[in-house]
Amino acid sequence: MDDEEDNTVTEFVATSTAQLFNVYTATDHAVDPEGKVLLQYIKSVLLEALHSGKPHEALSREIVSTLSRLICAGKNPETELLLLKKALGAGGPCGKILQYNEPTFSCLECALDRTCVMCMDCYYASPHHTEKHNLHVNTSHGSGMCDCGDVEAWKYGHACSVHAGKGDEEDAAVEMKLPPKVRNIATIVFKELLELAMKAFIEKGESYDEQFELPLAVLPAFGDCVDASDRYVTVIYNDEVHNFDEVIAQFKQLLKSSHSEASAYATSIDREGRMLIRTAGKEECQELTRQFLSYKPGEHSRIRFNKEPLVTKSMPEFVFVLQNIMVDVVDWLSDLARLNAAFKRIACNVSFKEEDNSECFIERVMLHEPYFWKKVKCAWHNLFMSAYFGDSLYKKDIGVLFIKNYSAVFRSFLEDDKVREFPYCIISLTVQLFTVPSISNILMTEYSALEIIFRQFVDFYSKFVKQESGISKFQNLQSNSTISKRRTRINHVLLDAKYILTNIPDEIPSSTEDAFLAFLQLFVNFISYMQEMNPHIRESGNHILREKEWDQYFILEISEIRQIMSYVARWCTATPRLFVKSLEILIKAQLDNSEKFELCDPTAVTSTVSLASLVRSLGGGPLTAQWEQQHRQLGDQPLFARKMCYVQHDMFKDPVSFHIPVTRLFSIVFSHFPKFDLPLELLLKTFTPEELLDLPLRSILLSQQIEASMWKRNGTTMENQSMCYRDHYKSIMWDKDLLAVQLLLTLCHPEDAILKIVQKYKIEPYLVLLSSETSYDPLLRMAEAFSSLLLYVICERFRLNISEAKECDIIRKDAVHILAISNVPRSKIIKTLEANFDHFEEDITKTDEIDEILDIIAEKIPVKDGVKTMLKLKPEYYNEFTPFYYHYSHGQRQSAENTYYQRQANNTEGFKPPPLPGFTKLTRQLRHYLTCPIIQRFIYVVLKRFNSDTSALVSDLLLHQILYLTMFGVLDELNTPDNPLPVKFSHCLTRPDNPAYLIQEEGECSIVSLLKNLLSVDVKSVNEIKPLIRWILKTCDILTDTASTPEGTESETIVESSPKSGADSHKEMMKKRREHLMKNFKTQQAKFMVENQEAFNNIAEDENKTEEELMETGEETEHFVCGPNKGPIPRPESNILTCILCKDSEKVNTGYSTMMYGCLIEKSVVLKTDKDNEISDDYRMSYLVGGENLHIQSCGHPMHLKCLQSIMKLSPALQHLLTMTGADRNRYSFFLPKGEFSCPYCKMAANCALPVVGYEPRDVQDISTEDFLKDVIYSLEANNDIELMELEFSESPATRSPTMPTIVGLDHLADAQNFMEILRDSMLHDRINRMSEELPAAESPGPDQVDPGTKFKEDMRRFYRRAKNILDQDAIGARCYAPFTLKMISYTFSMLERILREKPLLAGLAEYQEGFFESFLHSLHKSMTLNDHLYNQELTRELLYVFSAQVSDSVDLPSILNTDIFTVFVAARFVIFNESKSYDSAMVELCVIAKIIKILLSVSPDDLVGADTGADDSDAIQLATLWGYVRKMCGLSSTDDPFKCPTYLVSKVQLNLLPLLRKLALFLRYATSITGCAAMKEIQSPQGEFNLLMRYLNISSLTNLLTIDPGYKLDLIQKWCRSLNRDKFMATVEVNKTKREAKLIDLPTNFVDLLVKASKYTCPKIKFGKIQTTAVCLICGDLVCFQSYCCQESIGDSNFGPCNMHAHRCSGDLGVFLTLEKCQVLFLPLRTQGIFINGPYVDKYGEGYKYTKNKALTLSPQIYRKIEMMWIRHEIRPMVARNSEGLGFSRIEQIGLMY
């Protein structure tokens, strides 16, 4: 573009801008009603952008700035808009739009529902916070707003102190308060800009020009822009079809971009909804578009691509720029509307205005949503929330518009492929409308909102409804991606219906009732299709070949319909009219399916059940012939003959289903019958109870049959369905079926109903007693199921509307049975209660009510960590527990029985019956069932069989159930003396002529007599239940007036004598058992004494010693780890090690061994912070103390090297296993080609092997410090490395060193030039010869064997190479491993000292760890003296110079005061070594003196000014004097005046010197194997530990240590002080004051504070949108993206997520992150491994977010300390290795990619 054209465009922009302000601000009334001038300005700016190439962000800022000034009539917008906000106020509720991941606060006591939330500022200023109500904290999904100030959202405290009094009354003309000019300008600006934005965003439909590829509505105003630029753009849109990997692969192949660039493209598409990928000519852009639309993956691609192409378009550049600008303009309009109420009203007036009977603007936005991409949807969403929903005057009108267009809006939402995130869709705004009671009631009554909404759900599923035998029901609900995607969206319909159903008015008008009944009819018609869907027929022959798909049917009923089922039931029971009409609809829906019922005419059919017919009814079986032969003479003698009506359905032959939602809804509604006091006859005219009883009975029986393994041939499908029915979703299936059976049995005749159930269960043969019976398991299992049903239906009364029990009683009953099994945390109780009670009963699951009940029935028991508390049932509530509770699953019931019988065995107070509430008026009929002859007969035959020795048709479970059934019957009669039954239950038990006892050939007996006989049975199962039997007998005596029987009667004798005889027999048996055990014990004892006779002889000798000898031997020997009195020197002992792989044992003496330890070497930054930089990189010794550090640890389990190598050779085969599927894929958690493995015994991670050597005791004398310094100086003089300089003291070096130094181990030295080489060779020769002599003769190498010394060298080389590869220090020579090895030793023992600070120093490690560290140091020591590749001449010279008192100008090495002293000590002890003498004491003394000098130099003269200066302690005086001396020597002071507060110096020195003393003691303890005294193996005070360590290191006192006479030691101290780098030292002192060492970051007390911080975090690589989740690095405190592609980077050929990349930069590949989404800690020890554990934030019960789902959490110092210690102790990687075996490699790779 030339300059002339550029000037023309610039002038056009200036002219348009000037014209805009002239027209709009000239008068009070704008003269641009059609907005032509405004559009002309927009076009001019757009033309400028096309010519200049200015980015659209800059254009948007320019336009927004101009429009802001225009709104203010040409004045400064910053001041004018602020004045308008103060003058008019924001108006109405708070209305703050909650950003993604922003914390939200909801009061559990005052919120109308869970959708009512407040922002953080409003909550902390509200009464909910000040009055400390129960709080629920969560994070926003980006689609909500603050409800502070909304009266309808809160029961109490609807506003904070800021918004109190606002929004109660809405001003109908609030816009008139604006100045006329501002009001008119704002009206035109809102109208024209919103219209322009709508036109620009439409990219489909009739208003879109396919030829020019731009919206037709834009052409009239922007036609000039088409010819202004011929450039086009290619844009890719987001969809729900493709995932990240597919998009990245296409970008890499078609655009030839790198992985990071392709990931950035994919992330931008996901964040903004579209992405510009090419700007070029029209043909080039269209060609690229065709390539994307026709893309096909390569043949070798491992990514499974979707068949549909990416949504790709090419369009003119000006359209793309215009769209981006208008998005920013709409956001500006949202901000303007949020400014005050007047702008909100103007936006609403403009948007709701209809022209030419067409749609208003809001309707157009709703209907055109499929044309918008994510960023546009977000802009419209913000406008709706800021402007339209913020004005309460128009809020109802928006709701009306939503309902009118709901079908079209939802249909477009259902089919829109661009929808990936629901919060930004128009349909998501319904929560802001339908949850408002005033609006939802109007929409429901006047606009049939419920029916319109649910109709969308019905229409979606109508294609799956098919007719079969004239009945419509669901079929072929297959699971595929299309249906799953649509079904995820269709659930939003149920949410909208739930929002409306939640609000039930106190007074419901008839019009509202009619609207609900219309919806109910539609709802019941729909669930009628679900009645008996997915039926199954029992396979009795072969196993089923193909199992049917069942999960989709359960999803439909449980996950979808369940959401509104309970709310529908609430509406059905709201008024009497709704109750009656609802029952009519539900009963009719069930009876309409009567075609599949075969009902018998009750007047024509008589069911005569005889003994023979009962036997024949089995249809064959192993017992049929036997029964027929024995009882053929009985003929057709009637057992129970009654006329009855029942449904002809055989559970073994006919189809049966778990799905009966209509019946379950009927049971919920019908249970409220007593609430309305209606005549029952009115209801019975419409149906027969037997017709409705059969369906719930089938489902219950089906579950029991599956549990009894009678449906095995149908596969696991039936077991899974039964588990869902009985356990996972019992509150809406199992419970409702039991409720239906209970209610319907109250309407039936007891004998008819029981006979029907007996026939249903096919247990008629069980009621016949035979002389000899064989086992028939199905019949016994059905008898157990029948007795369970009787217990559940007749005896289970803690149900709403079944008994007189209150809601709190029901909660307590359930909580008691949860706690009765085991101690559980509070969260498990809450979760179980929520599962046991559906939403219809959610009022009884309020957490505050539950907490009150738990405080009464349970006591809190803290667990071992002291944070989490467990709840334990109080003993006084044991009697409320019954093992046959209806909410127990099969496994829980078994646990309950075991727990119950254990308590009964320890019970000395006798049996106490559980509380039994009375029935309601409706269910009172259930009491009559226990007196039914059939049930009496059933009880009788069970007891009769158990008393018989020949019957096999009885079990302990059946006996216990019958006894509990009997107990409940007796207890019910005892509790209701004023309301007796016609036939008392106690009389039925005691009458021998009971009609139920039909077989008289065995003599007359009663149930009571059989119970008495049980007391004489000595069986464990009976002994456990005898207290219950005694209580039943005692209570029956009371009820039948026989309790006054004199003592000594037969009945009393039976009751009391039987247990006594049983107890005697038990005692006799236990006595014999004890005698047998004692006899065996004596035999084994005698055998042991014979085998260990020598040990017993030694004991005898000790016993013969005199008291004086014992006193002498009892004195503890002094332990010194160094010095002239070093000892006691341990004697070499034989250490037997057993290989954990081959189990061979080996004695490890003083020579070599074939054993090895598996070790884990890893990088560590625990003791290093970013500011820790004491040593400059310029120093040649910096690799000893700076850079990265290595840490080594081991489990201590030995193994042979050959065994280990045999495992490592399997790695090729294991690589093949990694590609396999199934269980073998998860067997190994490490990549073996990297040389990593896990210990076969403990699964401890390891990556190298360390050879084991025996300890060689060195009983050599420790020389003095002066002699050590002489040897050092002579070594340097002999080597002729430095020029000697005259020191300050008068004595010359020659007089001080008259003899040859012993460090070389030679008497004469002919040539000093090659001194170090001769020294190395001589030491190597001596060591090899000496070790060869010490090896046993049997182990000498043969002709085909490897020399042990050579093999040891090779093993150690392998160890060093592995460590070097982990450290990756290329700067070190290939043959020099000493520097990083010495640093690894120093760092490991420094970490060991840090770990043992809370334990005894010399007794804090386990025995196997102590053995490893001893072997570790001995192996390294032996390797240092043998292997030439370890020797480093430069390192030796540097260390010699550190301890040399001589100074040389040619040597530039750091002072020891500028280094880590312990690292120097470790290096010096390994390098400066002599066979004939020990330097330990001298080096310890010098290092301690150096540390004291460092401590003194860090003390400033201004410290403790004004403190007490008196000091009588010699240590204090000596330190004060030395303080002045060293400061003068270092040049920090001009005088040597002593410190003014000597006592402060003593405490300062002792405190800072203690860590070094601990490190020295630890190192020398394992290096010399000299253990400390007994006191050092106990936890001591700091002062006591200091004294013990000084004694152990042979340092008598600080005074003696610091009393330095003129000599080498004083010269060395002067050298240290003079060569000190003062600037770096003082900088290090300042850093150390604030340095955080071996500690994770400090976390805030409240988890909310972290959420607030995270909500403000923005990823540096994205421009729009919030990241999904964030994580906090606990090592440095930075926030990073989590589970996101935005920050993914590459290392080599692998790609890693943001957490891995941050860990790589921050902590050397070891990451410790706290994820804020689920409050979990993520450990990332390697880039390919990771694991989650619970976070450190808990609630008041010590439970985290995983259990509470509430983010109102506080920091637990104990848990955080535990996590911190895991990091400090380097336990993370071993823990991940042990726990990642079940993850599999696919999961591990995903951790590396995503995290």
Image (spheres, rainbow, N blue to C red):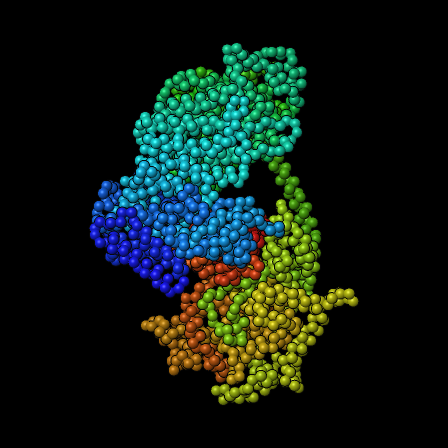
Q: Is residue 269 visible?
A: no
Instruction: Specify the farthest residue to the right.
Output: 1343
Q: Where 826 falls versus 914 (above or below)?
A: below
Q: Which residue is drawn at 58% across and 76% down?
A: 1435
Q: Residue at x 34, y 33 (%)?
A: 443
The answer to whether residue 922 is visible is yes
Please state the horizontal and vertical placement of residue 1086, each as a whole percent of the image: 68, 49
Q: Residue at x 64, y 43 (%)?
A: 1078
Say which quadrant the N terminus sits in.
Answer: bottom left
1262 in relation to 469, above or below: below
* Residue 1088, horizontal then vertical, whole percent: 68, 51
Residue 536 occupies which quadrant of the picture? top right
Q: Is residue 749 left or right of residue 978?
A: right
Question: What residue appears at the point 55 percent right and 26 percent down from the top-left corner?
Answer: 656
Q: Tell me where residue 1515 appears, x and y as whole percent.
A: 43, 74
Q: Pick the residue in front: 1375 or 285.
A: 285
**Which image quadrant for residue 1239?**
bottom right
Task: Pick whichever, 1039 or 519, lies toward us.
Answer: 519
Q: How many labels does the image show?
A: 0
Residue 1490 on image: x %, y %:
48, 75
